[in-house]
Image (cartoon, rainbow, N blue to C red):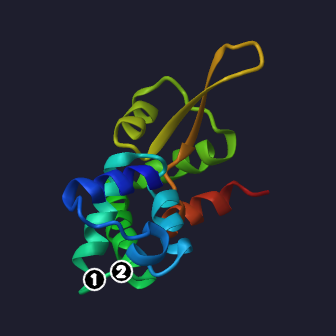
Amino acid sequence: MKQVIEKRVKQVEPSLSLELETQWFDNRETLEKLCLMSGGHVRNLLSMLQEAINRTQDLPITAKAAQRAITNLRNIYRRTVNKEEWSILAKVSVSHRILNDKQHRDLLFNRCILEYRYYDEEEEMQNWYNVHPLIKGILEFKEAVAQLEP
């Protein structure tokens, strides 16, 4: 994800050769947080990066600007989820599996649930699902997870 940002920065301004982690961002943790909160989704990463830049007067991008960008996109995800879907997301976050039904497919297509693929020891492709990292910070999701606990 860091390489995506580096390539994007060089596309916009090829003459700039600033060190990404120290001169574009106030610290490495700010950059890493944006990358992690994207869930590996490039569109989310670039959206948050643009929002953080819009909230910054001068480089480097601060942790505060990055957090506001994260919060902004998190709020969009909050509005995407219907009341009855929070429990579905909570179950997916525990099981890392989805059912083949309309509700799970809708959440997958809305990127509330992310699908990751990998090859197992026998070189068979496996799917692994999880809730988008942005959703994990939403109160309704946290409450739904707490209801799952015995």
Q: Position of residue 149 (x, y in %)?
A: 74, 57
Residue 132 position (above or below residue 121): below
Q: Nearer the viewer, residue 78 or 20?
A: 20
| Disc 1 element | loop
- Give the residue number, with chain letter if any, for mark 2: 65
Percent position of residue 91, x then y: 62, 45
Q: Which quadrant is home to the C terminus?
A: bottom right
Task: Say few, some or many: other residues with alpha carbon within 10 Å of mark 1 (under 14 / 14 to 19 / 20 or more).
Answer: some
At label 2, counting other C-alpha atoms closer than 10 Å, the crowd grade (few under 14, some 14-19, many 20 or more) is many
**Residue 31, image x, y percentages:** 48, 68
Q: Tell me if label 1 and label 2 are in contact, CB under 8 Å.
A: yes
Out of 36 and 61, give the one closest to the viewer: 61
Pick the front one: 140 or 123: 123
Residue 105: percent from left, percent from top? 41, 31
Residue at x 51%, y 34% (from the top left corner): 115
Task: Name the residue tied to disc 1.
Answer: 56
Residue at position x 77%, y 19% from top?
121
Residue at image location 40% in from the left, 82% down from the top? 62
Determine the CA span between mark 1 and mark 2.
6 Å
* Residue type pointed to by label 1: Thr
Above or below 125: residue 130: below
